[in-house]
Amino acid sequence: MKPNSRISLLLFMLMAFASAFAQRSELKKAQEFLANEEYFMALEYYNQAEERGAVFNTQTKLEIARCYFGLKDIQAAFDSYAELEQQLTSIDVVNYAACWHMQGGFDVAIEWYEKAKKVQGVNPIDMNKLIKACEWAMENGRLDPAVVVNPEIQLVGDVSFGIQYYKDGVVYSAEKQGRSKEVDRSGKGFLNLAFAKVVNGEVQEGSTVFSKNLESDYHVGATAFTSDFKRIYYTKVVRIKGGASRIKIFVSDYDGSEWVNERELAINSNDFDVAYPAVSPDNMYLYYTSNQGGSGSQGGKDLYRALIKSSGDVGRGENLGPNINTFGDEEWPYIDKEGNLIFASDGHLGFGGLDIFKADKAGDSFTGVVNLRQPINSGKDDFGYVLDPSDNTRGYLSSNRLGSGRDDAIFTIAPPVIQKEEEDAPPIFGLDEVPVVDMQNEVPVDTTPKVVVPAVDISMFPASLETKITSTFNGGVIPGVSVVIRDANNGTMVASGETGDNGKVSIVIPDEYKNEEQEFEIVFSKGSEFNSKRMIVNIMELEDINNNGLTLTPNFDDTVLDDIGTMIVPYEGNKITKEGLAVLDELAVYLLQNPNIVVKLNGHTEAKGNRYNNLNVSQDMADKAEQIMITKGINDDQMIPRGYGERYLKNKCKRGVYCSDSEHLINRRIEIVVWRILE
């Protein structure tokens, strides 16, 4: 072997060794973060290892699934576990069952909870309670027509959790502007208290810092006020000796201009967390959540109460007992004006995740725990329920039901829109006779406002998703494609199915989802053979899918073809960006060298403005990309431009979800898809 060849081989071996060492180092760090339940950082290191070429074994893939589950990214956790269904053991069986539970697949969840009963270390009694919860959810899934729950538009985007009425507005937790990019173990920026005015039941634009004195370098949130608004209780994350952190409740007083005299409550400890305070209407008790365990604990996090002293501190905590607390977590207590307890729990009968429950006041305790059902609750975490002091039909709750589930948002609670029945038009002189009214016997007219619920003919809506799925590459049908339909508003699983040998799938749409405003999130996937496709569609758009079919793009063995299938051409306004033009240059070089390759230029837009206009814009941009390619010498027979409007979004930014301009811009793109190879 020549000297230069030996040197090259040695350098190659050293580089390979260094790369392998870096991969092992990153995997080790990822596992350390996972062991400490720091899921966000764990995922960061798993991703770095993958970027360096690491090939994950089954155990590592399970660890990644646990990270997604810990971050409440239930869709990603579900997808990860589904690929490893036959290899699941220990806690992963329970997690996978919970994923099905939270997505509305209650019958499948029951099967996996049954399997979990045989896993070492899992309490079969707890699994039986979760099975009972699934059975309850299957029988109680209809929406309560007397309640409407919608995202609070003014607060979506920068809000994590927790809101409370305060004088003429609301106090809530929001990421402080202008801070460093330091994040917590979930990858979220640190929160402090903000204030926004409320006028006629609507939050106004322009929030302000609630109190400079209450700001912290870490999280501050979950407030409660005494009835005179002269004292505030709030939750803070604090560092303790050794570098760990604890959640504690603090109290401060209002001196007429600012909140002062901050002090820590006696119920706090460096050994456990104390959080989410609520003050009873008579200012006698402070209710809170703790995982302190010990005598009287039911497991997980329990609800407690303590007498409030004149100093603002509290006495010894009292566990609310087994009628309220369960083997799961009970959090976010709230006491309404009648003294009833409202709280969040994942241990009582529910739809998965935290649901909101109510227990009636009975003397000095509470009884009759009931689930507030949908739409108050969803398959995700729902918590932080509060009512308007002047109107108990309105209020707020917090939930992670939007998007992937990693982020919490605040939702409004309100009754349906009330309309007065239209009065008859006055008689026209000469055409109608003026009636003579006997005033003594006149029957009073009922002017009480009525809820007008127009009759809806559900036969006008598509009865099912019934379509054929084919390959973008050769037009062949694709059997075994998993199709999952979810309610795009709350993430609840609606139905699911799989294509047969003929590539066709038929999934019935339940009647309760047949309304004009209904939007679905539909995911089509087939393991690693094809690229998955995610769609947000209105119920009426199901007819388009039924009539036109749907295509999936295969993952090619050819590296170059795989690379082409991942090409994205971004554009702004009606112009392709410099980055997009560079992608087209790269594509042109390949197509000139391979005139037998045919690609589709699929145009997409964000979900803003007029839907029909978006469809035209996406087609125009796809046509523009084709014209640019023609000027580079590409035959137009090698390209098929198609516009899809806002149907295929890359992120959470569907209609009704607040997103920044940069987030919306991600959806303005032209995707390159390998269509076929000409013979």
Image (cartoon, rainbow, N blue to C red):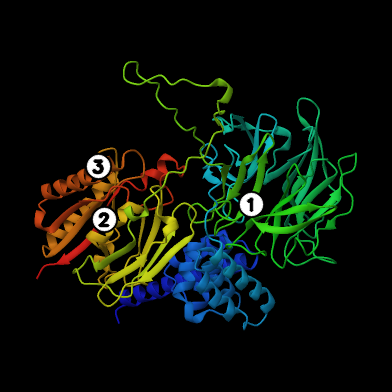
CB under 8 Å between callouts 1 and 2?
Answer: no
- Rate crowding at label 1 as few (under 14), some (14 to 19) or many (20 or more) other CA atoms within 10 Å: many
Q: Nearer the viewer, residue 363 or 252?
A: 363
Q: Amino acid at mark 3?
A: Val
The residue at which mark 2 appears reads as 544
Q: Earlier in the sequence, mark 3 or mark 1?
A: 1
Residue under the image location 89 percent in, 50 percent down: 315
User: In terms of image quadrants, where is residue 393?
Assistant: top right
CB under 8 Å between callouts 2 and 3?
Answer: no
* 404 relative position to 357: left or right: left
The residue at which mark 3 appears reads as 617
Q: Amino acid at mark 2?
A: Asp
Q: Earlier in the sequence, mark 1 or mark 2?
A: 1
* 371 relative position to 142: left or right: right
- Quadrant occupied by the N terminus: bottom left
Secondary structure beneath disc 1?
strand
Q: Position of residue 212 (x, y in %)?
A: 70, 33
Q: Amino acid at mark 1?
A: Phe
In front: label 3 or label 1: 1
Q: Position of residue 291 (x, y in %)?
A: 76, 61
- Rate crowding at label 2 as few (under 14), some (14 to 19) or many (20 or more) other CA atoms within 10 Å: few
Q: In the rendered image, is residue 219 in sight?
A: yes
Q: CA distance from mark 1 to mark 2?
A: 38 Å
Q: Nearer the viewer, residue 511 or 12?
A: 511
Q: CA distance from mark 3 to mark 1?
A: 41 Å
Q: CA distance from mark 2 to mark 3?
A: 19 Å
Q: Earlier in the sequence, mark 2 or mark 3?
A: 2
The residue at which mark 1 appears reads as 383
Secondary structure beneath disc 2?
helix
- Quadrant occupied by the C terminus: bottom left
